[in-house]
Image: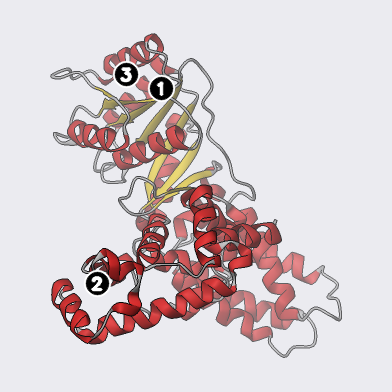
């Protein structure tokens, strides 16, 4: 996410490197480069120009302290203006009512149905809500079945009416059923079209009028850049929605939609979604995204993801094992599973300051763990508990059983021993979970 923009902005700031002070000339040169970077990221010309004008006004009115270099001052100004451009603060969804109703709208292929499932899981697991999904896309043949599959996967019921072609009637009946059965939230998945058309606008407007939802969200494919912004504007002019959801943020997206949509439409981005996993939904935090764009990492989000996955009781047990030097290969395997649950490993690592640039050209994803997992699962329970008993013949058997080589088995055992020593040395922080919590306290 934003990889090209990160690189371009970094180069822009180098113009000020070695300068003793900020002047109109070096600021103009820097901003010219920043404007090009934003335009290449598919930010509209009008938005990019206003952004640079605002930065210039702040920079020229700033008294640079002798202890702060011009380059550092410009980074700070650009960071604050990027956050402001995207809305400054995060914006939560409004789920008032008995039940609360969230209406999900957008074009076909934007990821509405998948997002509806992700939001249902988010509200169920993180907000403790009793959630129902309503299948109101009566046109796309697989839409209702897709929502049912997602609902079963996350343990959330899906209301649908076989053969009924009236989405307003289905939605109203779903809300009545939810009210009767004590559900606190209904998420209504609606039909999309391949492009904005009057029929679609009439239908979604009719749904909103009939349901009076507490929250209307517009789902946008972030990979479509400025097209996404224009589509959002067209929908908002008719629907007056409450917020935007950016999907497919793990794809080949330049970031233009994220940077432009608030300025053009005037509505906040509330969530960003990446990948197919139901847990892969994050609240949009403008300041944290600005951190990422400027290569500063995002430690707070990293801490939050770790805290969601690392169990307190398991952490205590692991700490005791480390104290007694009893950390096993099965414990190592379990830690890998928890890290994988946090999301794409490269995205997670890039949240650590400085790591994004270091990993830019590294081909790394969660499939990188497959050979490690296969090797560990090819061992006997005794070998996982006491890897020191693994001799040459055992290594050959493990390699054959896991479809790897003896060299890979040797490498894993060496890495495991190094990890065990490292974890024991930081045991006072209480393993990875403890490290994350300490990092979080330092940041907040």
Is disc 2 in contact with disc 1, using a CB cutoff of under 8 Å?
Answer: no
Residue visible at 28% across and 33% down in the picture: 151
- Disc 2 crowd rating (10 Å Cα; few below 14, some 14-19, many 20+) is many
Q: Quadrant of residue 316?
A: bottom right
In the rendered structure, which disc, 2 or 3, sits on the residue that comes first in sequence? 3
Q: Nearer the viewer, mark 2 or mark 1?
A: 2
Q: Which residue is mark 3?
A: 171
Q: Nearer the viewer, mark 3 or mark 1?
A: 3
Q: CA distance from mark 2 to mark 3?
A: 50 Å
Answer with left or right where residue 341 lies relative to residue 59.
left
Q: Which residue is mark 1?
A: 208
Residue visible at 56% across and 42% down in the picture: 266
Instruction: Please determine whether, in this image, residue 120 is positioned above or below residue 387.
Output: above
Residue visible at 26% across and 42% down in the picture: 108
In the rendered structure, which disc, 3 or 1, sits on the residue that comes first in sequence? 3
Q: Nearer the viewer, mark 2 or mark 3?
A: 2
Q: CA distance from mark 2 to mark 1?
A: 54 Å
Q: Nearer the viewer, residue 127 or 386?
A: 386
Residue 371 on image: x %, y %: 25, 72
- Disc 3 crowd rating (10 Å Cα; few below 14, some 14-19, many 20+) is many
Residue 325 on image: x %, y %: 50, 70
Name of the residue lying farthest toward the bottom: 18
Instruction: Please determine whether, in this image, residue 413 is positioned above or below residue 127.
Output: below
Q: Which residue is mark 2?
A: 375
Residue visible at 51% across and 26% down in the picture: 95
Q: Nearer the viewer, residue 208 or 433?
A: 433
Instruction: Please determine whether, in this image, residue 373 is positioned above or below residue 358.
Output: above
Colour pattern of the rendering: secondary structure
Q: Quadrant of residue 425?
A: bottom right
In the rendered structure, which disc, 2 or 1, sits on the residue that comes first in sequence? 1
């Amino acid at each position: 996410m934003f990889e090209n923009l990160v690189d371009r902005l970094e180069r822009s700031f180098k113009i000020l490197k070695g300068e003793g002070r900020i002047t109109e000339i070096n600021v103009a040169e820097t901003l010219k480069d920043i404007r090009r970077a934003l335009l290449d990221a598919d930010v509209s010309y009008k938005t990019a120009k206003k952004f640079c004008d605002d930065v210039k006004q702040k920079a020229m009115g700033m008294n640079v302290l002798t202890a702060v270099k011009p380059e550092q001052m410009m980074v700070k100004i650009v960071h604050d203006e990027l956050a402001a451009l995207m809305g400054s603060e995060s914006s939560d969804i409004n789920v008032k009512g008995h039940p609360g109703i969230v209406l999900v709208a957008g074009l076909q292929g934007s990821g509405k149905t998948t997002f509806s499932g992700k939001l249902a899981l988010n509200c169920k697991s993180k907000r403790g809500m009793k959630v129902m999904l309503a299948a109101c896309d009566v046109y796309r043949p697989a839409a209702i079945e897709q929502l049912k599959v997602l609902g079963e996967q996350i343990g959330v019921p899906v209301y649908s009416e076989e053969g009924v072609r009236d989405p307003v009637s289905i939605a109203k009946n779903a809300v009545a059923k939810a009210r009767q059965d004590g559900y606190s939230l209904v998420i209504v998945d609606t039909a999309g079209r391949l492009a904005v058309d009057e029929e679609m606008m009439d239908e979604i407007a009719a749904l909103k009028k009939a349901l009076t939802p507490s929250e209307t969200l517009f789902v946008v494919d972030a990979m479509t850049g400025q097209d996404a912004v224009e589509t959002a504007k067209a929908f908002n002019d008719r629907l007056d929605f409450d917020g935007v959801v950016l999907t497919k943020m793990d794809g080949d997206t330049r970031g233009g939609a994220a940077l432009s949509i608030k300025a053009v439409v005037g509505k906040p981005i509330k969530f960003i979604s990446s990948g197919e996993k139901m847990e892969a939904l994050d609240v949009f935090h403008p300041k944290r995204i600005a951190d990422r764009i400027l290569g500063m990492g995002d430690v707070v989000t990293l801490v939050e993801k770790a805290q969601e996955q690392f169990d307190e009781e398991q952490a205590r047990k692991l700490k005791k094992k480390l104290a007694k030097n009893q950390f096993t290969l099965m414990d190592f395997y379990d830690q890998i599973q928890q890290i994988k649950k946090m999301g794409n490993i490269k995205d997670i690592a890039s949240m650590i300051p400085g790591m994004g640039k270091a990993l830019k050209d590294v081909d790394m994803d969660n499939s990188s763990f497959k050979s490690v997992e296969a090797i560990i699962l090819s061992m006997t329970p005794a070998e996982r508990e006491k890897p020191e008993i693994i001799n040459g013949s055992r290594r050959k058997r493990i390699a054959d059983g896991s479809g790897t080589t003896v060299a890979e088995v040797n490498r894993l055992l060496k890495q495991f021993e190094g990890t065990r020593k490292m974890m024991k040395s930081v045991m006072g922080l209480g393993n990875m979970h403890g490290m994350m919590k300490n990092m979080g306290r330092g940041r907040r």
